[in-house]
Image (tube, grey):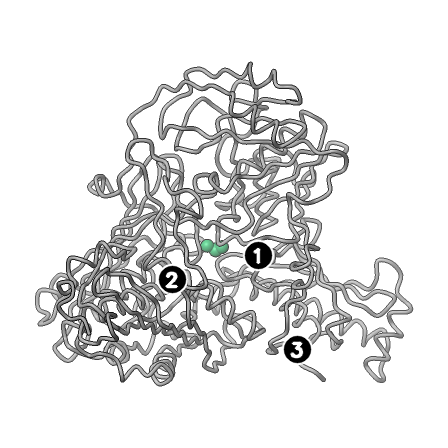
Amino acid sequence: MTRFVGQPIDRSDAQLKVQGGATYAHEVDALGKPVYGVIVPATIAKGRIASIDTVPAAAVPGVLLVLTHRNAPPQAPFGPPEPPTKAPATRFSRARPCLADDRVRYWGESVAFVAAETFEIARHAASLIRIAYAAETPRLELREHLADAYKPAGITASGKAPTDSVLGDVAAALAAAPIKVEATYRTAYQSAAPMEPHAALAEWEGGKLTLHTSTQSVSDTRAAVAATLQLPLTDVRISSPYVGGGFGSKLGVRPEAILAAMGAFMLRRPLKVAQTRQQTFSMAGHRPASVQTVQLGATKDGQLTAISHVAIVQSTPHEEFAEQNAMPARTLYAAPNRSTTHRLVRLDLAGGEPVRAPGEAPGLLAFETAIDELAVAIDMDPVMLRILNEPKIDPEKKVPFSSRNLVRCMQEGSARFGWTGRPTTPGTRRDGRWLVGYGMASAIRSNYIAKAAATATLDRKGRVTVRTDMADIGTGTYTVLRQIAADEIGLPLERITVLLGDSSYPATAGAGGSWGAASAGSAVKDACAKLRAAIVAKAGGGDYPKMVMTVARGVDRPGLVAQGAVVGMAENPNYQKFSQHGFGAHFAEVGVDMDTGEIRLRRMLGVFAVGNLLNPKTARSQLIGGMIWGFSQALLESAEVDPRYGQFVNHDLGEYHVPVYADLPDVEALFVEEQDDKGNTLGIKGIGELGICGSAAAVGNAVFNATGVRVRDFPITLDKLLAGLPPSGSVRA
Ligand code: MOS
């Protein structure tokens, strides 16, 4: 029988998407002529609305509703879901009221809302709203307020992980170490900026809400909307079959969804609201900035004796977000003395939120740069240094790894990349006016699984439909679930339909944390195995394809249904007995213009060990996407806070720099074979976030190797390099 899993199959939804047939939330045909909403954001960082004049806006012909804190419907207070919702409390199912009071907590918080017959009318009327603020002095600068850092109760390693860890005596080991590195790194605010801005269409029928919205987690969005509007869960339906990227920013509920739901209820009309691109920079969360200090102690031959990683990260007074920046330092290398520390600083900015590899992406940028600095200090090949400190078991949890092939990734990567041909003395290789350098770094990202359910239904035509509320945020979920279903049922791909993103389907935790494929995939596999067993039991025997058709012809509507499920990490003992992670090694070559400091990527290679591949084509896309984002994190991306008003000033894709094709001449992701049966029945590990783990450090390390200039304030822009470069013209070829 054909096995579809493991094949580089094209995306099921590719044609629909390129032909415009995949309908995104804001494009859905409403039940009746829709109303359009526009959100008015606050223009101070902190304070109170002193007065608000909506009369001119309300007077514009075509305006149907102007909402402010004075007339917004009652909502639950901000916080965990309350009865009657009875949903499990997660960060993403929290009630998130809009226009609930006169407080302004951050620049860009929604303070008014206009709904009108057309978008243009709503936008014009919104511009007429006059707000006077009683502004207070905001705290905006992470660097200024470092002394006020506090210890959160836990960090967000998919739930709560310990805030700090200590093994041995780091201070004594550092004092005794012949080789020491201590360095402080700064990472920038980053926006998720998905291609499809956050959007919603709300419709009420018979007292029940249908919300078409762009979300990574249908179940959490349903719970959060129900909690905010104080509705029973069963009165809220979420539909989100296509999502144009999320990267974490669509895990939670945003103002457009709540405002659309409230406005549609008040107007008894369908209501469409989208954030503008500019608004996504303040309303959709961001990767918080950090200041991180890494201390390493080692012997002269490169044995690590001490590791310390202290991460201080932006949070807010209104909502805590505690990234896991120092988590990788708990697992990556062996050392007898070690400590990791997470602290937060409350600033009057929008809250930090998960953004692809939250914690690991900025954490590994600091940590893997420090490891490179140690290699330089010892004058040792950075690959050799890492191999020398490979742990046999998890160095802090003291349990075995479910599988760990980091060394193989490094060896395979160095061979393919030609690592031995690297410039061993920084700043010495030239190609015309370009200084050329090589850099590398390790990748690590925890492997997770979340509770999930699915159904598989055989219809009268012998087709199977798989249903789960899982999202496809552009990763290829439709495709890989179809491959899994086809193999498990024993039918060709053409006979399998996958339906996703609807709260009427069995619940999952959605697409986040790189757990999506393992979680929904395991549930689908289970449902399909049960359906196959039911088919065989009903038919009683014979040739399987014939059995399918015999059983199919006999089924009534809605067909023969099998339920599948998988338990989450808390119920799966393998997540306590084993340390589970995906690993990889990144290699980068850059050129730096010796006169201008301009940095160009020349090539980048990642080699990854992630268990089985469901689909090498979609897996490669995920990983090179992450690698490219790491390149961008190292050299380009920074959302800059205006120190007066607390807005991210470069809040569009013209001013907030992201790479384009011309920046990425040669980026490749390869895999080493790996068997791992500990995480899930598919033998896979999460891959959505692994590519951005460590890739920024590899690029930064290459810049150092090219120039001999170590920039620890990311992104590495040319102005930070220039002072250290050779005098202009002196070394021109
Ligand atoms: Mo990811 S930051 O959990 O979407």
Residue on which disc 1 sits:
473
Residue on which disc 3 sits:
4
The secondary structure type at the circle numbered 1 is loop
- At horizontal 48% and vertical 82% (from top left) the residue drawn is 673
- Residue 630, numbered circle: 2
Label 1, ligand 1: CB separation under 8 Å: yes
The secondary structure type at the circle numbered 2 is helix
Q: Residues within 10 Å of mark 3 (few under 14, many from 20)?
A: many
Q: Amino acid at mark 2?
A: Gly
Q: Camera-side residue: 166 or 197?
A: 197
Q: Amino acid at mark 1?
A: Ile
- At horizontal 84% and vertical 62% (from top left) the residue drawn is 559
Q: Amino acid at mark 3?
A: Phe
- Reply above or below: 49 against 271: above
Label 3, ligand 1: CB separation under 8 Å: no
Image coordinates of residue 207 in percent, x first then y, are 73, 31
Q: Earlier in the sequence, mark 1 or mark 3?
A: 3
Q: Camera-side residue: 24 or 709?
A: 709
Q: Earlier in the sequence, mark 3 or mark 2?
A: 3
Image coordinates of residue 44 in percent, x first then y, are 37, 28
